[in-house]
Image (cartoon, grey):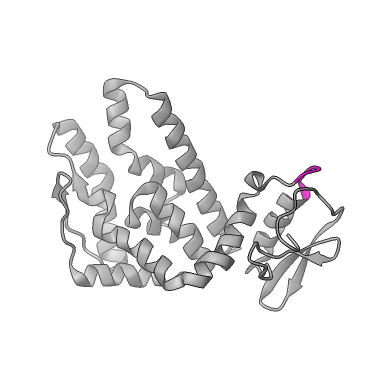
Amino acid sequence: MSGGWTARRFWTGVAVVPVAGGFTVELDGRRVRTPAKAPLILPTAALAHAVAAEWDAQGATVDPRTMPVTRSANAALDKVGAQRDEVIALIAAYGGSDLICYRAASPVELVGLQAAAWDPWLDWARDMLAAPLVTTVGVMPVAQAPLTLAQMHRAVAAFDDFGLTALHDLVGMTGSLVLGLAVAQGAIDAGTAWALSRVDDIWQREQWGADEDADALAAAKEADLNHAARFLALTRL
């Protein structure tokens, strides 16, 4: 978006070009910039080609809603990079209230479903992140050990700005830092993580039936989760 977002398409050709620090996209030889006018420098050719494909697919007018990879890349450069410490803290804070730590008291069927779905990922957090988590019944906050929180913060801080951009949505859409990190570290796929994050909702749906508004919101969140997983993969190819 040389000069920022434009309402009408002004280019005919789109190209991926190697530059110092990675790759960029050119529109008729003009390098794309972020909304904040920063050079759009992308870490991998795969990510650059995905961005280029979105630009190439635009019609007579530019529709940012059809350019999710470009939007995420812009966010990594303009927002995450500019406030990295704050973003890390925001994501890591989910470790203090992770979805999989909050269990139902009843009925016994739901208690069993939660344990079967979530206990293996508590084990994973303990073994792979050195971050043992405490569970509780109900919604009252449970304090996690300072060392556990520090380990989870360290795991989040290990991601670069593009990885943090993806992790933000992997965690936010599931409500679980553990599940988000598990996807980001390749221990689980996004579809399975989504199903695990929906144990309570699926059980409620089976008991009381579908809710169109809730289903529409869930579908949008699932799409965002899948996009985040794809974006992260593109940053590593």
How many numbered discs sit on the rendered protein?
0
Q: Is residue 49 visible?
A: yes
Give above or below for 140 relative to 17: above
Q: Give residue 88's quadrant in the image.
A: bottom left
Which residue in the rendered view is the most extreme toward the top?
209
Pick the residue in front: 162 or 114. 162
Q: Would you say 233 lies left or right of 156 here?
A: right
Quadrant for the C terminus, please: bottom right
Q: Position of residue 157 (x, y in %)?
A: 40, 72
> Residue 27: horizontal and vertical position, in percent?
81, 60
Left or right position of 140 against 185: left
> Residue at (23%, 41%) from the top-left corner?
114
Query: How would you classify the magenta stretch by its main secondary structure?
Result: loop
Q: Is residue 11 above or below residue 103?
A: below
Is residue 160 among what the camera can see? no
Q: Is residue 11 magenta?
A: no
Q: Is residue 20 left or right of residue 116?
A: right
Q: Residue 155's quadrant in the figure? A: bottom left
Q: Is 231 on the left-hand or right-hand side of 159?
A: right
Q: Point out residue 97 in the picture as x, y percentages from the top left corner.
A: 25, 55
Query: What's the magenta region?
Result: 56-61
- Residue at 51%, 42% (x, y): give it: 223
Q: Is residue 59 magenta?
A: yes
Q: Nearer the viewer, residue 17 or 11?
A: 11
